[in-house]
Image (spheres, helix red, strand yellow):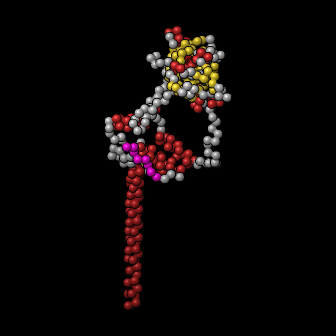
Amino acid sequence: MLHVRSIWNGAISFGLVSIPIKLVNATESHSISFRQIHTEDGGRIRYRKVCELEEREVSQAEIGKGYEDADGTIIPISDEDLSHLPIPTAKTIEIVAFVPAENIDPLQMDAAYYLAASGAPAAKPYTLLREALKRSNKVAIAKYALRGRERLGMLRVVGEAIAMHGLLWPDEVRAPEGVAPDVDVKVRDKELDLADALMDTLGEVDLQDLHDEYREALEEVIAAKAAGETPPEAPSAPTGGKVLDLMAALENSVRAAKESRGEEVGRAGRAQPKETGGKKSTSTAKKTAAKKTTEPARKSTAKSTTKSTAKSTTAEKKTAAKKTPAKKTASRKRSA
């Protein structure tokens, strides 16, 4: 970190404690930049700084700052004028308060910096401030001047270092008026349940696993062009009309998310259990159990039906046997 060029040197003012520090950029851009060229011959297009009064190009050493007044008058402002601004934050990050981190609106967050201790004498007060921030579970609110204006900052601990986030002033954050829908919309519980299911299915993510796929694709195109090859073609965009049914869109989203995780999905995006290791699925097991339960019942019913039929047949035979002798006796009396 100490090998990175500092963009500002000063001190942190912590009450009567002064901590010499260097301000270092905490972030870096990995975006691919392009040059403007003349499409006919590939020549570079450059901007030249020209004095409009003399109509000639001037060097950087001849260029200074100036403020344009309302009537168009230019008031020259030198670096010396800026260095003597009557504010205590010209070369100092002045801590004004300590507040819980949740009190800071993320909309106010701006550029991020690391504050590096400048020299051995700064080690002890730097460590003191860092440990005090850790134990308090708070962040420090500070004011500082950078690039021609006074700014607001938030100091917090990152690892074993102190980082500072530039903050927009509260009046620089616009109110969200006119942004939300101005129509009365009611969301059903079923829609919320599906939205919750989709959130649960997508789950969490380790931000370290995310990367800039656009930059990687752009690098492939540049490499192919440099090698005289045909750049890779972009995959065709999905076609189809707009989904007007919110419930259907949510169900399809849940189904797609679960399928991407390797889960079997049934109707309404419900995950179905798989058959693994030769074991039957839950539904198959239930059907087998039901079949086993039904078969004994059918057998007992058949047995009881057979027994009752046999009993009734036997009874009928006995009755018929009793009636037959009576008939024979009656016929003998008539013949006598």
Residue 98 visible in the displayed image: no
Q: Quadrant of the C terminus?
A: bottom left
Q: In which quadrant of the rendered view does residue 174 lie?
A: top right
Spot occupied by residue 98 in the image (x, y as percentages of width and height):
62, 21
Count of numbered circles in the view: 0
Image: 15 above or below 249: above
Q: In which quadrant of the rendered view does residue 99 lie?
A: top right
Query: Residue at 33% across / 44% down in the picture?
Result: 277
**Which of the pair 133/90 is nearer the observer?**
90
Q: In which quadrant of the rendered view does residue 276 lie?
A: top left
**Which of the pair 175/99 is nearer the observer?**
175
Spot occupied by residue 80 in the image (x, y as percentages of width and height):
59, 15
Query: Magenta includes 184?
Result: no
Query: Residue at 45% across / 32% down in the picture?
Result: 45
Q: Is residue 181 left or right of residue 215?
A: right
Write down the region rendered in magenta.
Answer: 233-240
**Which of the pair 238/129 is nearer the observer?**
238
Query: Residue at 55% across / 48% down in the picture?
Result: 191
**Magenta region, main secondary structure:** loop
Query: Magenta includes 239?
Result: yes
Image: 165 above or below 262: above
Query: Residue at 52% across / 9% down in the picture?
Result: 121
